[in-house]
Amino acid sequence: MCMRCFELSRRSMLIGGGVLASSLATGVAQARIRPAEMVPLIGPAFRPTDTDEKGLWSQMDRVEEEVAGSNLLIKDPALVSYLQDIIGRVGGPAARDMRIYLAHVPDFNAMMFPSGFAVVFSGLLLRMRNEAQLAGVVAHESGHFLRRHMIRSWRDMKRKSDIFAIGAMAAGLGGAGAGVYLGDYVQLAQLGTIMSLFQYSRAMEAEADAMGAKLIAEAGYPPIEMANVWQQLIGEDANSARYRRKQRRRGSLFDTHPSPDSRMADLRISAAEVTVPGRAYDSGRARYLSKIAPIRQMLLDDQVKLNDPGASAYLLETLAADGWNGLLRYYEGEVWRLRNRVGDDARAAQSYAVAVAYPDAPPEAWRSHGLALLREGRGGEAKSALARYLQMKPAAPDAPFIRQMIG
Amino acid sequence: MRKAKLLAAAAVLTVTSGCNAVGESTDLGVYQLVRARDTKVGNGSMYVTPPRPWNRQRRLFFDSVRWVEDWTLNGPYLDGITFVSGLPNSEFLVRQRRTEDRQVPKFRSNMTAPEIAAMLESAYRVRGGAIEFSTLGLTPRTFMGYPGFQFDYEHLDGDELWRKGRGVGAVIDGRLYLILYDAAKSHYYGNAIQDFEVITNSARLRR
């Protein structure tokens, strides 16, 4: 279902009152599933015929209506059609049937709903280094749909327990209306309450991984990128936890996903298996960067301003593995400035100074550089940096204040 | 800040009484009347005079800090004023655990107005659930006789509502004094912005 359900379900549990706990204990070690064994279980224009599945779909149509009307969606037509193109390339037989929505939520997540629509969080776009990685996530989600995981887990769940009535799903959604505001991004992720009713087993996650690897390889993307995504996710989580001096959440009995490390290992083997020697694979990096260019600064803002320095610093370094630039250096400075520990002022100042040496430094880098110089008592240089900011962005909302500072 | 508290309140109320939202069926003594006269706010080092009665949100929540106090007119989802009465160096606007992944940044006495504005933005993103935040203006403004700033902004929150806010503040003797007004953009912001202005202009330090 989703790349990070463990996180989502942890939050949803807060709303869902923990009634789902019984569905979580599926900690059975799982052998790797071979991509070659993964054949889609549905064809084009699939519609459910069984009564229970029809009921589920009609509920999901209502959910989709809610999602489609949400003002948390990023509706930029160019971006949306780009995502739709990708699902078209890696969606297998259902490529033309699936819909994709881009939600403005700075978390790393994507989820597929039972009736074939997917929600991708904007935080995911920030973390992808190329189109192949994005395609890998989308293909994984498509895999759940193509393998009919939702209805399979739904039936499984109903067999196990009666409390998972359809009404419980409505109650989950109703949480939003009842004013249970979590001060978090969960309003949309509350859909996760519903989704957590479809807890996939580890076997299903492994199937979706295998199916995904196969789909992106067929579409001409290097299949190893799926493993790379997973590695980046593990690294980010670990780094975030280390900064706050916590243990990284490890796969446990209560984690329906395979443990992150074994999942990554499986993905690497699967990638090797589906790679055809001699075939040219294209990660689509240049295309990806040009497509997300209009929102990249916003995505970085969304992440860095959450002041999660471990995750943000790791993320910036990951993105900079393909080359540092002014934008990334500026945000590196922002990470230190917001972290605000002893010595961070100097670290931030250094990043800003480096950032402004790049031609692509955003105007804000000049402002921060100027403020840092001011703090160091270098008034003259500070003024010229702040003047440069005003020159680049004369209508900046904080221009009146900066002008006063320059005097 | 306020919304983070709501989280706590909503959780408590849902568990204990099963009611829907704060203040709907019962306020459990969450609110106290503030009369239209001289009133001390926060830790008592700042005084204001509201033009009409407001409601003070009791500080019974786990994340209150003693320099911060919240008022509302129509309920905290719709409007509210937050007073910060002299937050010292190295303190936070909210109480938070050291192990929290995402943290409201620390206040430092040497922060300039753009940095204080950025700190507030992060507070809205981290604790208020803002997913979009835009600065509308940052201008010089005298506050309680000291050189300060006025910060105007709006934000889209996780509950899909656009809110608009204005903060007026100054760093005085190394402490942050600030009054922050935040309300639903449609109707509510316009409804009480004049109250905010009167309150802000009436603000003074305890002698």
Image (spheres, coloured by chain):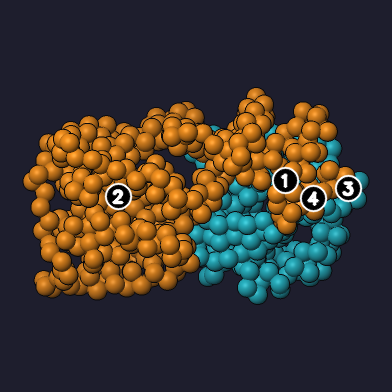
Chain colours: A orange, B cyan
Helix, strand or loop at mark 4: helix
Which three-letter amino acid code belongs to the residue tagged 2?
A: Ala
> Residue B169, can we see it?
no
Considering depth in this image, is B68 or B40 the residue closer to the camera? B68
Which three-letter amino acid code belongs to the residue tagged 3?
A: Tyr
Tell me whether circle 4 and circle 3 mark residues in contact (CB < 8 Å): no
User: Is A159 placed above or below A369 here?
Assistant: below
User: Is A106 placed above or below A377 here?
Assistant: below
How far apart, in angstroms, are the residues tagged by discs 3 and 1?
27 Å
Q: Residue A280: percent from the left, percent from the top? A: 23, 40
Q: Is residue A179 left or right of residue B114?
A: left
Which three-letter amino acid code belongs to the residue tagged 1?
A: Tyr
Q: Which residue is mark 1?
A: A389
Q: Which residue is mark 3?
A: B146
Q: Which mark is residue A401?
A: 4
Q: Earlier in the sequence, mark 4 or mark 2?
A: 2
